[in-house]
Image: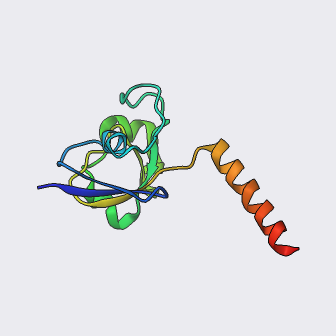
Amino acid sequence: MDYTITFLPQNKTIRIKPGVTLLNAARRAGVKIPTRCDGKAACLMCKVKVDAEHLAALHLPTDAEKHKLGSLLDAGTRLACQAKVRGSMAVHVPEDPLKAAIRKQLERQQEEDDWF
């Protein structure tokens, strides 16, 4: 059985087999999730946010995730390199800080242009 994973805010959806990590699913979908440790739960760069209603679509956190994330797990934060899929779900991928700053500046400029 395949599952559907939707990456937000990119709105990219992919069908994958059970047990695939969110990092590998994102790579297959063409969604960039940064990592330096190549999936060994060492760099903490691949943090993603999972809404409460979708947490059951992932296997329980690994010991590495528990150690690295601590209380962030309670807020739905998971390491994409460790979180393995067991159901269809949506995942929030944090926006790159530079891209976020550029997007916000463009939005402000558009608002100013619309004002006049």
Q: Is residue 55 above or below residue 93?
A: below
At a point 16% along the width and 55% down the height, the residue shown is: 2
Pick the residue in front: 77 or 19. 19
The total number of labels drawn is 0
Q: Quadrant of residue 82?
A: top left
Looking at the rendered image, the quarter that the N terminus falls into is: bottom left
At a point 64% along the width and 46% down the height, the residue shown is: 99
* Left or right of 56, for residue 97: right
User: How far across and down, in percent of the image, does residue 47 sit?
Assistant: 46, 43
User: How far across and down, in percent of the image, does residue 69 sit?
Assistant: 45, 42
Q: How is the image coloured?
A: rainbow
At a point 38% along the width and 64% down the height, the residue shown is: 52
Q: Is residue 30 above or below residue 49?
A: above
Query: From this viewpoint, which residue is outermost toward the left?
Result: 1
User: How far across and down, in percent of the image, does residue 22 sit?
Assistant: 33, 45
Q: Is residue 110 above or below residue 28?
A: below
Looking at the rendered image, the quarter that the C terminus falls into is: bottom right
At a point 26% along the width and 45% down the height, the residue shown is: 84
Query: From this viewpoint, which residue is outermost toward the top?
Result: 37
Q: Quadrant of residue 24?
A: top left
User: How far across and down, in percent of the image, does residue 57 sit?
Assistant: 26, 58
Query: From this viewpoint, which residue is outermost toward the right?
Result: 116
Q: Is residue 115 above or below residue 22?
A: below
* Left or right of 87, for residue 90: right
* Left or right of 86, for residue 12: right
Pick the residue in front: 7 or 41. 7
